[in-house]
Structure formats: C-alpha cells, structure tokens
Image: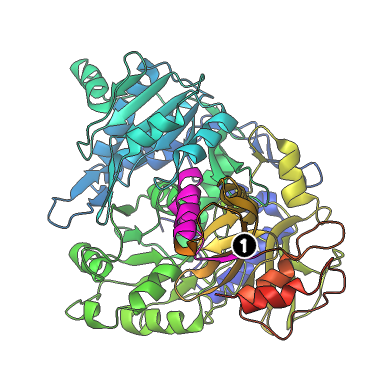
Amino acid sequence: MLFPYQIKSEEAYHQAYKQSIENPPAFWSAIAEHFTWKKKWDDVLTWNFSEPNVQWFKGAQLNITENLLDRHLPTKAHSPAIIWEPNDPEEHHRVITYQKLYEKVCQFAHVLNNNGIKKGDRVCIYMGMIPELAIAVLACARIGAIHSVVFGGFSAQSIADRLYDAQAEYIVTCDGAYRGQKDIPLKSVIDDALIGNRTVKKVIVCTRTRTPVSMLKGRDVWWEDELKKVETLGLHDFPAVAMDAEDPLFILYTSGSTGKPKGVVHTVAGYMLYTHYSFINVFQYQPEQIHFCTADIGWITGHSYIIYGPLSAGATTLIFEGVPTWPDAGRFWEIVDKYRVDILYTAPTAIRSLMGFGLGPLHGKSLASLKVLGTVGEPINEEAWHWYNEQVGKKRCPIVDTWWQTETGGILISNLAGITPSKPSWATLPLPGVQPILVDEKGEEILGNNVSGNLCIKTPWPSVLRTTYGDHERCRTNYFATYPNLYFTGDGAMRDENGFYRITGRVDDVLNVSGHRIGTAEVENAINMHAGVVESAVVGYPHDIKGQGIYAFVIYSGAHGDETLSRKDILTTVTRIIGAIAKPDKIQFVSVLPKTRSGKIMRRILRKIAEGETENIGDTSTLLDPSVVEEIKRGKL
C-alpha cells in the first residue's frame, strides 16, 4: 500500500486515534519514517503550552521540497503535478509534470540565489493564481528562504504593513492578474506599497497581463530575463538546502482582534507531516486522482491543500486562476468535467453563491468523475450541504466538512471521506493526534455530550503555529494565555451525543467573511482613517452568501450631507487601506455609540441590532445613556 498510515475503516480510525493519544511520539515517528530526511531526529516531541514552546522532530534535518518533488521522480516524473486552468476558458491550459516542476523550481531557486536571496531571508510573494506562484513558493523552500504570500486582493497599505512586520527584503510579483472580468494591477500596487520603504532590495516581476509597469533600475527585474540567464548556463538542478526541523517555512498573515495583522509562523517538518497526513486521510486520496481546491494560494487553504499536502502525496493538484461565476456560473462544473476531477474542495460561500443561480448552470454537466466533496472556511449550513450533496455529488460522494485555521496549519476536525460518519453542518470527529475539549468562561472543562462551550486543544499536533513573527508574546497572549495550558481556538462549539463537534462561530472580535478572518479592529481603524469619521464600531451579522457580513455603525461629521456618497467615500477608504475583502456590507450612520461609563463600546448590543434582534437586547443598565439604543434600533438598515 502506498500510504500504510491511510485509515481505511471506522475501526481503524478509532485504533489510530487511541494510539495517537496514548503515545504521540511513537504514532508520529512511525509516519515520519516514510519521508526523506537528511538527518533523523533526536526527540519526536518536546512541548510546553504556557510559554508556548513546541518542537517536533528536534535535531532532524530535511528539505520539504525533496519530499514534494525529488522523491517522486523515480516513479512519477512524467505524471502531472499541476494542471493550470486560466481565467479565460478560451486560453490554453497548462500541464506541468513532476519532472518539469522540479526543473522549474530548481531554476527559479537559482534566480533567487542570483538576486542575493539566501536561507532565512523573508520573501513577500504577491501574485495571481498562476503556476509561477507555486514555483516561487517551492523555490523559496528549496533555498531555505521564508515565503510570505499575500493575497492578490490586498491593498498597498496592507502589503506595506506586512513588509514592515516581516522586514522582508525581497518581493516576487506579476505585472498584473486576471480574476473574472477584473484586471488587477499587482506591480503598481507593490510600487505604492514601497513608497518610503527602505528595506526591499529586489522586486522580481513575472509577466502575465502585459500591463505597462514601472521598472526601477537596480531594484526591479523581470522573471523571464532572470530565467534566461539560468537557462543559458544549462542549470536544471539546485541542491536542496538542509533545514532544521524547526526552521520557519513560511509566515502567513491573519487578522487579529487588534488592528495589526499577525504573522503566523509554520515550521518545516511538522507542517510537512501534518498536511500530508491530513490530505491523504480526510480526502481518502488515491494515486492518480485529480484534486481541485478552489481556494487562493494567498490563504492557508491554498498553502496546505493546493501546494504542500497534494504534492507531498504525489497527487495532481489543479490551480484555477478565475472565479466560479465567470464567464458564467457553470465554470466549476465545466472544470470538473474537463479534467475529470476526483476531489472538489471549496467554501460554503461559493456553494451558496452558486445555489443562487439555480440548476441551469449544472445542466449538461456530468460530474461523474467526482468521488469526494469538501468544504472549508466556515461551518456549512444544512441547506447548502444538501444542495452540494444532491446536485453536485449526486448523493454518491461523501462530503468532508473540515474545521481548521491558519494557526493550525491543517485540518483538525473532520469526517474522513466514506470512512467515518458525516452529519450535515457538523465537522464531527478530530483527526488522530488532535485532542479537542470544551471549556466554560472560567476555563473549566465541560464534560459529557450534548454540551457547548469554547473550543480548545489540549496537546500539540505537528502543524501547530510556533510563534507570531517578531512578537512571541503576542502568540502567547492570543492563543495560550486565555486558558492556561490550552490552545484557545477563538471558536465556540457544540458536542452532540456521538461526540461530534459543530463549530458555532467566533467568540472573539474576529469576523469570518466568506471563510476569511477579518479583525473588527482592523476594519474600524480603516473606517476611522476617513476624514469625516469621528468614531466607528464594526460587528458581524448573518449573510445569506458570505455566512457573515460586516455591519459598521459610524459617527460621521463630513462636509456633505449625502449619505449615499458618504458611504461610498468610506468604502473607498477601507478598500485603499485593507482591500475590497474588508468593505462593510452595511454602514449605518449614528449620532452616538452605546458606551459604558468607562467608555467601552458595547458591541454585544450592536451585534444584536445588526442581527435584527430588537426585543431581547439584554442589560443596558451599564450604559452611559441607555436611550441611544432605541435611536440606533430605529435607524437599522
């Protein structure tokens, strides 16, 4: 069997889970033996959540790309590693074999090296969904540079903040990107982000849209020109740099409850092991299958289940440049049939959006190749689950409802496709090695079933975050200080009579919009940057498509009295500072915000109003002026 640690029955799941809890080092080291190591480990696991300090495979050395590329070449050199479907269905797709991907990664590793990039350097990658994005990520890993991919929809200010936080000296970008009907001017956004920047030494620019761009002598170079220098020398190999097991692999920024994004750090060995293990078990991957994860590589889902997980298993991973509704709402289904996709992994937001177009876009689509469906980013509602099951899976494809986070690196709670039971809108059971518990507000464990509480994890799994870049104390206070000796997820959850878990949503000041986490403080900071805004408060509310929408209550003293124009001004400001993804769905102008006598904004009350709850607002006696609640209720949008 190719994967002797792939779980093939419900009984085997319970056996593996028991082993993983009773003796984690023995369980994970047995799996680790199947990977390529330059030097074996001294200790499998040492940990302390109070600091936090977690180390997996201490003393080991490896390079993750040898496990994604080199080790597959004897048997899979001519098998497709990446299939790329462009934004425009009329444009020719690309198929990159494992041999060709290996060569391209090695050549771009030379390009990075030639431009002064070395082990430990931080490289910001800001690109569209093209194969070169995956190549850039893997080339960084090949030479030991730390990649920090930034989603192509973020603004110049957001990029500038991330460059500063990571002290990144190098950028890889494109002239532009295509996404549906939009042309996104990536290089010009980078240029704006670099105004006043004194640390960035090189910007490598890949050609995609042929958008005219400014190229600064000495700083900006073309990907293609740099590649020709390498090709002229006939270089097709690059020795993989030895990395310690706990060396950083990448930084990925996620919104926090303060206005400053957090740079989550994942390390080489544990992340490799866990993304591989979770990929082959959750999706029950079989050799030669084609895996289509519809996420953007700029998010953790793209890191783990477009690049690292599938390629570590020798799978074929499909990268799609466009959006599910362009040129029409049948695009996903056309792609599935075109490439005979086996595994489809997408977000509830996308499913709900496509449901809105009715069954027309599905007509004439076979979808017969599909074997497993998956959802990610947020809990899927029952209506969407059943539509996905009946209309897409034709009631023959198991649906894996996966719960995990940027910080967890891989899927922690999910049914295993066709192996363990599923339950609509429930993530169900933890993967082996993952010990979830529910606690009350005091941190006391809530025992038994048919209960709810705050979701924590008791012990480390291999891909747990190690720190937040440059600020370890922030990592401790955000994830490990709320409840001593536990990792706090920030989510609430229910546990049913079978021990299945259902995630009920964030319990902190972070919104989950279309599966992407956005800090309320970050949005408020952006709104408050507008000259006419005095103060604002942002909360989430139920949204039919996005799951959670952004509702902003704004005190405004701008010059013009046109509310529509004022709202547009504020939305433009948020887009400039964060990006379009953080634009509020509703902006309600108010004369005052509900505050306690100490000046704290009572977001609990605003959340109730945004959700449409007008009667059961809760206790308002602590407010400085309780009458403001009625005024805000009358103005609800």
For residue 617, which quarter of the picture?
bottom right
Judge whether 476 appears above or below 402 on screen: above
Q: Which residue is painted at 32% across and 82% down in the image?
A: 391
User: How far from the left and from the top, in percent, is residue 350?
Assistant: 39, 68
Q: Which residue is painted at 26% across and 21% down in the image?
A: 226
Judge whether 179 appears above or below 444 on screen: above
Answer whether residue 571 is visible to the viewer in this image.
yes
Q: Which residue is painted at 44% across and 18% down in the image?
A: 201
For residue 449, which quarter of the picture?
bottom right
User: How far from the left and from the top, in percent, is residue 20?
Assistant: 66, 59
Nearer the observer, 551 or 1: 551
Identify the residue position indicated by label 1 in the image.
Answer: 432
Callout count? 1
Asked whether, in this view, residue 422 is left or right of residue 468, the answer is: left
- Indicate the colouring scheme: rainbow
Q: Is residue 593 magenta?
A: no
Nearer the observer, 450 or 518: 518
Q: Is residue 574 magenta?
A: yes
Answer whether residue 141 is visible to the viewer in this image.
no
Q: Which residue is painted at 44% across and 57% down in the image?
A: 568
For residue 73, which quarter of the picture?
top left
Q: Main secondary structure of the magenta part?
A: helix
Which amino acid, by three-letter code, is at mark 1? Pro
User: How far from the left and from the top, in percent, is residue 592?
Assistant: 71, 63
Nearer the observer, 574 or 210: 574
Range drawn in magenta = 565-590
Mark 1: secondary structure: loop
